[in-house]
Image (cartoon, rainbow, N blue to C red):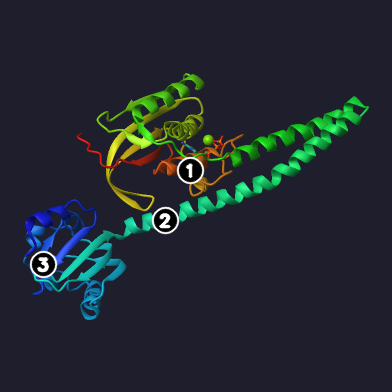
Amino acid sequence: MVSPSCLAAYDFLATGVMLVGADGRILYLNSAAETLVGMSGVLLAGQPFDSLFGHNTELIAALNAARDTHETVTEHDLPVQVNGHPATRVSCTITVHDGPEWAFMLELRPADQRLRIARQENIRAQQEASRELLRNLAHEIKNPLGGIRGAAQLLEHELSRESLREYTQVIIKEADRLQSLMERLLTPHRLPKLSPVNIHEALERVRSLLLAETPHGIRIRRDYDVSLPEIRADAEQLIQAVLNVARNAVQAMGGKGELAFRTRAARQVTLNNRRHRLALRLDIVDNGPGIPEALREQIFFPLVSGREGGSGLGLPLAQTLVAQNRGVIEFESQPGHTVFSFYFPLENASHKP
Ligand SMILES: Nc1ncnc2c1ncn2[C@@H]1O[C@H](COP(=O)(O)OP(=O)(O)OP(=O)(O)O)[C@@H](O)[C@H]1O
Ligand SMILES: [Mg+2]
C-alpha cells in the first residue's frame, strides 16, 4: 500500500490523481479527482475500476494501450462519466507501475483548462508577433519621416507667399504627430527591477493619479484584502500597467460611474505556462458600457482602439509590462460590468485570510 502521508501530499495538487491496484480496484482519489468525477474517494475506494468506469470506452482504450505497451499514454479531451453524473471532458495521462503499491496512475485535468491555457498561449504568441512587426515597421517609417519634415522646413524658408506656409505647416505638424506615435511604438522596454511591492500602496498611487485627472462624477471604491503578502515586481511598471487599464475604464464610463479596485488571493492558477499554488488577483471593475463586441478578441493588439483619439497602445503595453513581471491580464466584459483581472504569482508566500 502507498503510505497515507504520501497520499496526503496529492491533495495539494490541482491535477486529479487516481490510483488503481493490480487487481483492478480503485485505491485512492485525491481531492482534485473527487471534484472532477463528482464523487467522494471514500465511496469509490475498493470498488472495481471497470464496474464504475467501464462504459467510458475511450478511457478504457487508453488504459489498455498503457497496459499493453507499458508506456505512459496521454489523451486530450476524453469524456468521462461516472454513476449517472454528467460527463466531464478531461485530459488524462495514464502511467503503468510494476511495484506492489499500485498498478495504474491516472492524472486528470479538465479539458477546458488545457484549452484555456493553449488559447492564452496562442493569443500571447500572436500579440508578441504583431508587436514585433509594428516595432520593425515603426523603425522603417521613422527615418523617411525625419526627411519629410526637414524638407518641409527648408521649403517653408524658401516660400515667399505667407498663404503657402499653411501647407508646409500641415506637413510638419502631421509628421510630428506620426513621429510621436512611432516613438511610442518603439519605446524600449527596460528590464523590470524586481523588489517586494505592496500592491495596495501601488493602487493608492494609481487612485490619486486618476482622481486628479478625472471628472467629479467618477467614484473609485477600494475592496482590499489587506492580509495579502507583497509581490515581487517592478513598482513603476506595475503602476503604469494598472493606470493604463484603469484610465481606459474611466474613459469608457464617459465622466460618470463607479470604478472598483479589488484584491484577492487566487489558488492554483496557471500563469505563463507555469502553475502557481498561490497568486494575487487584482480586479479593476467598471460599470461602463463594456468593450464593444467587435473589439473583444483584439484589444491587446497594438493600434486597436475603439476610442476617438485613442492610439490603441495602452493595453498592449500593460500586457507586456505585466508579463515582464511574470503576471497576466485577462478580462470579462458585458454592458454595465467590465472586469480586468491582473494575476501575479505569490511564490513561497503563505496567506492567512
Ligand atoms: N473598461 C473598458 N470598457 C470599455 N472599453 C474598453 C475598456 N478598456 C478598453 N476598452 C477598449 O479597448 C480599446 C483599446 O484600449 P487601449 O488602452 O489599448 O487603447 P486606447 O485607450 O484606445 O488608446 P491609448 O491607451 O493608447 O491612449 C479602447 O479604445 C476601448 O475601445
Ligand atoms: Mg488606453
Mark 1, Cα crowd under 10 Å, few <14 / some 14-19 / many 20+, is many
Whether pointer 2 and pointer 3 mark residues with C-beta atoms closer than 8 Å, the reply is no
Kindly tell me whether mark 2's CB lies below 8 Å from ligand 1: no
* Residue at the (23%, 63%) spot, across then down: 107
Whether pointer 1 and pointer 3 mark residues with C-beta atoms closer than 8 Å, the reply is no
Instruction: Kindly indicate the quadrant of the structure image that contains residue 161.
Output: top right
Structural distance between the alpha carbons of marks 2 and 1: 17 Å
Structural distance between the alpha carbons of marks 1 and 3: 46 Å
The kind of secondary structure element at disc 2 is: helix
Identify the residue at the far bottom of this view.
68
According to the image, label 3 marks what residue?
A: 26
Q: If you read the primary sequence from the N terminus, does the residue marked by circle 2 or circle 3 appear first?
A: 3
Question: In the image, residue 147 lies at what x, y percent?
Answer: 78, 40
Mark 2, Cα crowd under 10 Å, few <14 / some 14-19 / many 20+, is few
According to the image, label 1 marks what residue?
A: 320
Question: In the image, residue 210 lies at what x, y percent?
Answer: 47, 24
The kind of secondary structure element at disc 1 is: helix
Instruction: Kindly indicate the quadrant of the structure image that contains residue 29.
Output: bottom left
According to the image, label 2 marks what residue?
A: 119
* Amino acid type at image mark 3: Ile
Q: Is residue 124 left or right of residue 145?
A: left
Rendered position, 120 above or below 313: below
Instruction: Kindly indicate the quadrant of the structure image that contains residue 94.
Output: bottom left
The kind of secondary structure element at disc 3 is: strand
* Residue at the (51%, 54%) spot, across then down: 126
